[in-house]
Amino acid sequence: MFVCSVKFTVTAYSPAGSSSAMASDDRRTVVVSNLAPDMTTPDDVAVFFESPRYCPAGGDVTHVEMGAQDRSAVVTFKDKLGIEQH
């Protein structure tokens, strides 16, 4: 399960053309919604998810794509995660 100290929503990311909610070969990318209002840049999100203090289930982040206006981000980690789908 993906656990962090701040409440937000993590859902599986489905690459375009994927038939499943999460491609079985890539459990590195998640969509995070309901981000805190002060998480406004990709660096803010990356620092949070790379911090064992705030997000023990996180890890090294390779890319963050911020949602245009909806306090969301697509976060890609260096390594596969033990993500539980909800």
Image: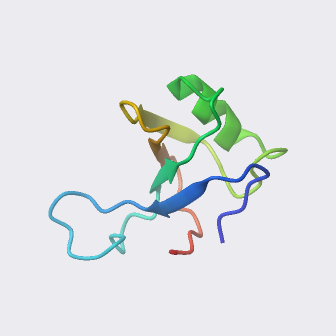
Q: Position of residue 25 (x, y in %)?
A: 36, 70
* Of 49 and 32, the residue lying toward us: 32
What is the x, y in percent for residue 51? 75, 40
The residue closer to the viewer here, 37 or 29, is 37
Vertical placement of 46 versus 12: above or below?
A: above
Vertical placement of residue 60 versus 22, above or below: above
Residue at image position (74%, 54%) is: 4
* Rendered-image quadrant of the N terminus: bottom right
Q: Is residue 85 left or right of residue 22?
A: right
Which residue lies at the image location 65% right of the left edge and 43% below the top edge? 49
Residue extending farthest to the right is 53
Residue at x 51%, y 27% (from the top left corner): 42
Farthest left residue in view: 17
Residue 67, quarter of picture? top left
State how the image is colored.
rainbow
Task: Give the left or right position of residue 12, taking residue 56 as reference.
Answer: left
**Where in the figure is residue 20, as x and y percent of width and height?**
28, 76
- Total marks placed: 0
Q: Residue at x 79, y 45 (%)?
A: 54
